[in-house]
Image (cartoon, coloured by chain):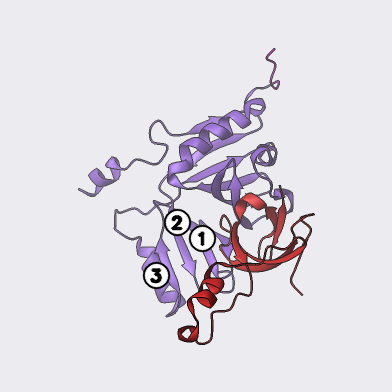
Amino acid sequence: MMSLPCPHCGPRDETEFGYGGQAGVAYPARPGDLDDRAWAEYLFVRDNPRGWSTERWVHRAGCRQWFVLRRHTVTHEIESPA
Amino acid sequence: MTADVLALRRSPLGDPPLDVRGPRLHLRELAFRTLLELRGPTGRPAVGPDEHVWPLGPGWWLVDGTPDAAPALESPRAAAWRAALGPGAGVVDVSCHRTTFALSGPDALLVLSHGCSIDLERVPVGQGVQGVLAHAQVVLGRVGQDDWRIHPRASFARHLAAWLVDAAAESWEPWGDQED
């Protein structure tokens, strides 16, 4: 069981949270200009790093706030984003 | 008519009322409390002497007050809060959303910690947390050193009551659990 640091509630069990995928995926500035391949990349393709990953989480059972943290996908070390 | 409607109400734990007492623990349901969720105030809202207010998140509060005397679609206190907080704030009557358990006695913290991974020892009197107790989402408020309020969702009340009675098995007996 991971313990995740909620910025509002403090450290809580992983089961209280929902996972929101990779952080920092910006909506395209001009989505109409994208071809199908670029649009599909934006919608579906995400990093799958072996190492540090920047992710969004929501504290579902607590304050229900979204936040960003960095997690090491091998060791599950957690740190706040730089 | 009014009395009839109030008589027809059933709390989530229904009849008979939950009231279990041991030498080191007292668990009971406080039925039909008036629960209001406030959205907006960044500072802790001031409440009356019979009320408690628990922080649920940033700008989000649960006010736990005495039951209303008359049946109404919305507690009149919701309108009073709306007027007091002004535009931009949200007030919702959630009295039927959750029910209220009172758990008190020297073993209260011990029993809660059987099913809750939050470090409740560090919650000061008058403060509350929102989290998970025995797989049920609850709001926990500390009204005294050994006196807690638990607000489970109504549909989880029966599960949580059963779990609490079971988890506190040693607290109900004068000499502890002597089975085997």
Asked which secondary structure carries label 1, the reply is strand
> Is B131 on the left-hand or right-hand side of B16?
right
**Residue A18 position in % (x across, y down):** 58, 57
Q: Nearer the viewer, residue B114 or B6?
A: B114
Tell me the residue that label 1 is attached to. Answer: B62
Q: Are marks 2 and 1 in contact (CB under 8 Å)?
A: yes
**Residue B81 position in % (x across, y down):** 43, 70
Q: Colour of chain A?
A: red
Callout 2 and callout 1 share a chain: yes
Q: Which residues are magenta?
A: B175-180
Q: Are marks 3 and 1 in contact (CB under 8 Å)?
A: no
Tell me the residue that label 3 is attached to. Answer: B80
> Is B124 on the left-hand or right-hand side of B91?
right
Q: Is residue B124 visible?
A: no
Q: Is residue B18 visible?
A: yes
The kind of secondary structure the magenta stretch mainly shows is loop
Q: Residue at x 46, y 36 (%)?
A: B158
Callout 1 amino acid: Leu
**Residue B82 position in % (x across, y down):** 41, 72
